[in-house]
């Protein structure tokens, strides 16, 4: 097996590193280092988003005509790897990674022209409205209703929950039931909702760490123009499956986890307890698992570059990444002893415990680990 990158790819890596050396200033590095949730917080993260957009490197996974770059899978892997190694902030992905590809694939020309440019520039900040109270992972049981009025527009009523960063959002893409008389999956539509209107209420959900990252969202007679229906009425389930495939398999998890494991090693080697054989064994196992995931995703990228369709390995990455993420944050909290159990109101001292508590959600969001195991059993093992 050839593990070396081609001269072309190494030249690309050098280009990315040179850019990050200049563009990733200390403000952005501090933002990333202090982030305890999944994504870094606006407004500073949106400034970093615009830096990448100015360079033309923000949405490599979009089609060229929408601002994409046409990078190869290996170039995308290298880019993610260098961002992680440099300590760049994680840009919220609800709009860029989830909605953007949906609009590119299913949106009208008018929707693309209206929504894609402000999405890239951060002028529109999008939330995702899928999960609902009482529905768990059964997305087809959603109860939010969208009914046509006399003008043909929609009037939406319902509630969404665990809505990430809705407190910052200007818009939300959501699923709503438009036809209750048909099979549940067939009666769902995909709508784009302007949150700056009467009837939209955002209520914070405080996590165990004290962070405000997710929210309850209530829609009370909220109006959605017919022009903001994506795809056909009743096509929402198919669009949602397309979106969830991007959410679960559209990212490389290994580079960030391998970089975190390296930083964990550096911190551990400075501690008085660094000679404890049990701790050293635990850390070595985390490092091995993180590098193994990184290599697995590299194999997937190489296969995609060779024109091969994704195989069963690609179904495992989110599941494995969730477990490694939780192991990383638990070890980071435990290795500093009693101080790792503290959760002060502010300051760097709260970061390990807050990250540990927030990491418990990794095996829930984007499809629970149980859902991932079911997908693997059906699609890879034919069980």
Image (cartoon, rainbow, N blue to C red):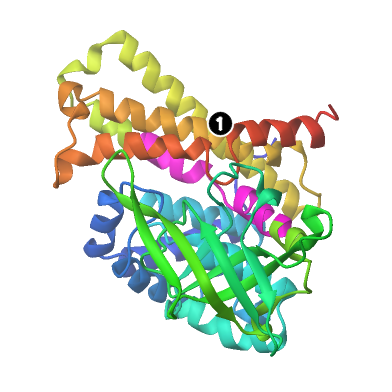
In the rendered view, does 304 fall on the left or right side of 87? right
| Quadrant of the image occupied by residue 352 | top left
| Quadrant of the image occupied by residue 186 | bottom right
Q: Is residue 338 visible?
A: yes
Residue 30, position in %: x, y? 23, 56
Q: Main secondary structure of the magenta part?
A: helix
In the rendered view, does 269 fall on the left or right side of 302? left
In the rendered view, does 315 fall on the left or right side of 276? right
Q: Residue at x 72, y 32 (%)?
A: 374
Which region is colored magenta?
241-262
Considering only vertical position in the picture, is 363 above or below 301?
above
Q: Residue at x 77, y 60 (%)?
A: 238
Of residues 199 and 277, the one drawn nearer to the viewer in this rendering: 199
Under tag 1, what secondary structure?
helix
> Which residue does the numbered mark 1 point to in the structure image?
292
Considering only vertical position in the picture, is 188 above or below 314?
below
Residue 372 within the segment the image draws in magenta:
no
Q: Residue at x 31, y 54 (%)?
A: 32
Of residues 368 and 269, the one drawn nearer to the viewer in this rendering: 368
Classify mark 1: residues with Cα within 10 Å, few (<14), some (14-19) or many (20+). some
Residue 323, position in %: x, y? 50, 30
Q: Residue furthest top?
A: 277
Residue 66, position in %: x, y? 63, 80
Q: Residue at x 26, y 11 (%)?
A: 276
Of residues 74 and 309, the one drawn nearer to the viewer in this rendering: 309
Q: How many marks?
A: 1
Residue 240, position in %: x, y? 69, 59
Placement of the C terminus among the 4 image quadrants: top right
Residue 251 within the segment the image draws in magenta:
yes
Considering only vertical position in the picture, is 314 above or below 91?
above
Placement of the N terminus among the 4 image quadrants: top right
């Amino acid at each position: 097996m050839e593990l070396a990158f081609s001269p072309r790819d190494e030249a690309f890596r050098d280009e990315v590193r040179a850019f990050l050396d200049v563009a990733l200033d200390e403000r952005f590095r501090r933002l990333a280092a202090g982030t305890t949730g999944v994504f870094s917080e606006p407004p500073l993260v949106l400034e970093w988003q615009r830096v990448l957009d100015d360079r033309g490197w923000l949405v490599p996974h979009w089609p060229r005509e929408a601002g994409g770059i046409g990078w190869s899978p290996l170039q995308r892997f290298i880019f993610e790897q260098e961002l992680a190694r440099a300590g760049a902030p994680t840009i919220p992905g609800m709009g860029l990674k989830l909605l953007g590809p949906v609009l590119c694939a299913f949106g009208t020309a008018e929707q693309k022209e209206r929504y894609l440019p402000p999405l890239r520039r951060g002028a529109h900040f999008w939330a995702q409205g899928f999960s609902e109270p009482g529905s768990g992972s059964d997305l087809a049981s959603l109860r939010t209703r969208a009914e046509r009025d006399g003008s043909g527009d929609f009037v939406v009523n319902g509630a969404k929950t665990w809505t990430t960063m809705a407190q910052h959002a200007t818009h939300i893409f959501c699923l709503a039931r438009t036809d209750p008389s048909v099979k549940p999956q067939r009666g769902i539509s995909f709508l784009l909702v302007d949150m700056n209107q009467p009837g939209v209420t955002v209520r914070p959900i405080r996590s165990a760490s004290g962070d405000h990252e997710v929210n309850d969202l209530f829609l009370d007679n909220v109006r959605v123009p017919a022009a903001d229906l994506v795809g056909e009425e009743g096509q929402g389930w198919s669009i949602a499956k397309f979106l969830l495939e991007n959410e679960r398999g559209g990212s490389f998890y290994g580079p960030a986890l391998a970089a975190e494991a390296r930083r964990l090693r550096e911190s551990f080697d400075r501690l008085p307890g660094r000679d404890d054989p049990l701790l050293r064994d635990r850390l070595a196992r985390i490092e091995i698992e993180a590098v193994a995931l990184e290599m697995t995703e590299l194999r997937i990228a190489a296969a995609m570059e060779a024109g091969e369709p994704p195989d069963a390995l690609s179904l495992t990455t989110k599941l494995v990444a969730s477990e490694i993420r939780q192991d990383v944050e638990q070890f980071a909290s435990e290795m500093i002893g009693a101080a790792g159990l503290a959760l002060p109101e502010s300051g760097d001292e709260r970061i390990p415990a807050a990250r540990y508590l927030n990491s418990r959600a990794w095996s829930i969001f984007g499809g629970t680990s149980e859902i991932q195991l079911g997908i693997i059993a059906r699609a890879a093992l034919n069980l």
